[in-house]
Image: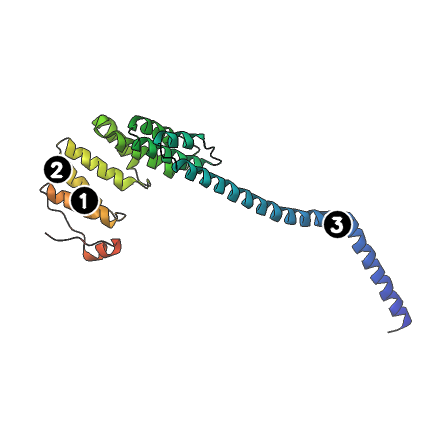
Amino acid sequence: MSSTDGFVEEVNEEVRRDRLYGLLRRYGWIAVLVIVAIVGGAAYSEYTKAQERARAERLGDAMLGALSMDDRAERVSALEAIEASTPTSSAVLSMMKATEQVEAGDTAAAVETLNALAIDGAVPQIYRQIAAFKAITLQGRDLPVAERRQAFEGLAQPGNVLRLLAEEQLALIDIETGDTAAAIAAYQAIVDDAEVSADLQQRALQVIVALGGEPVVPNSADLSQNGGVIQGN
């Protein structure tokens, strides 16, 4: 390489270096902000996780403390005093409170607690559905047949996780009102449902037989898939 070529190369290198420094001075702050954001985001994420763990631990300790009390009324009061930090924890607290109210013999208060939970839009749907189902079953025949039927029909809609249990309750209402044929048909529909559990399927078959019906027993492959065994008569 001639001295002229070497000089040109050095000049080009200086130009590139000057351009790089110029770009860094102009846009380097963006890179710094990105790095700070990444590091800060990771730190905030860890801080948030730690805070969530601490809240969960405090909630668990408070629940255990409430349930350790000997008097049920005191348990209910202690559960009511706990502040829930999330809708889910609020739902769990309400269900625990309702359980204690039932055990204390105050079914009306438990139903009120569950009904309040069932209409709380901030709570995940699964908890609201469970609360509604439990509130209806707690009232039993104290609730008029028409109201019970309407409520369970709402819970028996497709996509509801308690659909089949609600259908079973509707079949029981048919038995209660003397409509045996409708009850048998309802139980057979439960037996045939692809999502039915082995226990519920077995229970439905037994009720059909008890009502004088002749159940159509699913094939062995279906029973094996559901994990249950249907005993023959």
The dot on residue 204 is 1
Q: What distance separates the C-alpha of mark 1 from that of mark 2?
A: 14 Å
Q: Residue furthest right?
A: 3
- In primary-sequence order, the first of circles 2 and 3 is 3
User: Which residue does the numbered mark 2 point to in the structure image?
Assistant: 181
The image position of residue 18, as x and y in percent, is 83, 56
Say which amino acid is labelled 3: Gly
101 to 36, vertically: above or below? above
Q: Is residue 204 left or right of residue 60?
A: left
107 to 9, vertically: above or below? above
Mark 2 surroundings: few (<14), some (14-19) or many (≥20) residues within 10 A: some
Say which amino acid is labelled 2: Ala
The image position of residue 181, as x and y in percent, is 12, 37
- In primary-sequence order, the first of circles 3 and 1 is 3
User: Which residue does the numbered mark 3 point to in the structure image?
Assistant: 28
Q: Is residue 145 something that shows in the picture?
A: yes
Q: Residue at x 15, y 40 (%)?
A: 184
154, 227: nearer the viewer:
227
Mark 1 surroundings: few (<14), some (14-19) or many (≥20) residues within 10 A: many
The image position of residue 160, as x and y in percent, is 32, 40
Say whether marks 1 and 2 touch (CB < 8 Å).
no
Q: Secondary structure at mark 1?
A: helix
- In primary-sequence order, the first of circles 1 and 2 is 2
Q: Is residue 192 something that shows in the picture?
A: no
140, 105: nearer the viewer:
105
Say which amino acid is labelled 1: Ala
